[in-house]
Image (spheres, rainbow, N blue to C red):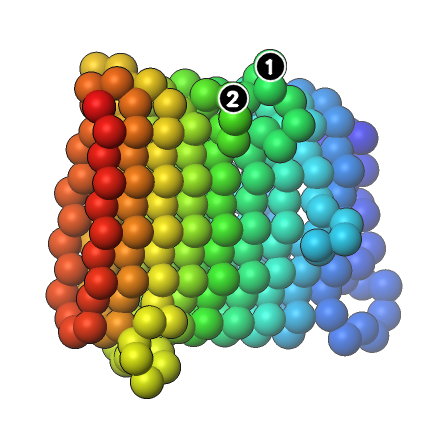
Amino acid sequence: MNNNLIKAIILSLFFAGPALANLIYIDQIGDNLDLDIVQDGQDNSIGSSSADAVFNGDNMNFSITQTGSYNVIAAIINGDTYTGTWDITGDTNDIALLCDSANSNSSCGTVTANITIDGDTQDVDLSFGETADASNLIANITIDGDGNIVAMTVDGTSVVATLTIDNTVLSGTDGTANTFTVGISGDGDADGHTYIHDHTGGGAVVNVTQSGIYDNLINMTTSGDSATIDISQTD
């Protein structure tokens, strides 16, 4: 599917007539994709648990902007190089990204992902490289809101992952609803396995696991009440 056809399909969804939700489903094959998706309104969806948005090809560059509540992104990327900026504004977002879900030969080798979410009750599940080493990953995830659940797994040799959370209240009586689980695996190299964590606010449960050969660096800053932090590193 070429880029022009993808854009035509997306535009038709916006102008096809009255609708209760903005829904986009994509199955794309081909290299050098350049795609921007913009959704504004309630119940935005790019893919779903039953019909993912699937992108197959190398040298992909696509960005997503969603504004409104109950946003959903369920995307699968199978390709060697991906660059993208996701900008989400609204509450009760469900974000899932699998980078190289079924293509172990290309393994999402070089990825730059910038994900910014402004709103409450986020459920974010990110996986980069999966079981095939991502050779070069830069991931920046920034969330401003309360009631966040973030899970990120990386299989890579050179990883710089930054998670920044700013929440203002305890979510739940025991303050455990803000949960961040990060796992980084694969053999490190001279600059591999770097995780930067900056959390401001109350009620945090943080679990970080890094494994590999020699390169394990965690830079963690927390400010707030009721934090439970577990860190495990293996040379």
Circles 1 and 2 in contact, beta carbons < 8 Å: yes
Residue 132 or residue 191, whichever sits in front: 132
Q: Residue 2 in the image: x percent, y percent?
A: 77, 29
Query: At x 53% / y 72%, what residue is drawn?
Result: 92
Q: Is residue 213 above or below residue 5?
A: above
84 w.r.t. 2: above or below: below
Q: Disc number at residue 17?
A: none
* Displayed quadrant of residue 56: top right
- Image height of 44 relative to 18, above or below: above
Q: Nearer the viewer, residue 206 or 75?
A: 206
Report which residue position mark 1 lands on.
Answer: 105
Where is residue 121? Give x, y as percent. Answer: 46, 72
Q: Which residue is at the front of the view, 24 or 209?
A: 209
What's the amino acid at mark 2?
Answer: Ala
Percent position (x, y) of residue 60? Answer: 58, 28
Residue 165 coordinates in the image, percent (x, y): 29, 60
Which of pointers 1 and 2 lies earlier in the amino acid sequence?
1
Residue, x 57% and y 39% (percent of image)? Answer: 98
- Position of 191 with respect to 223 (left or right) is right
Q: Which residue is mark 2?
A: 132
Quadrant where the N terminus is found in the figure:
top right
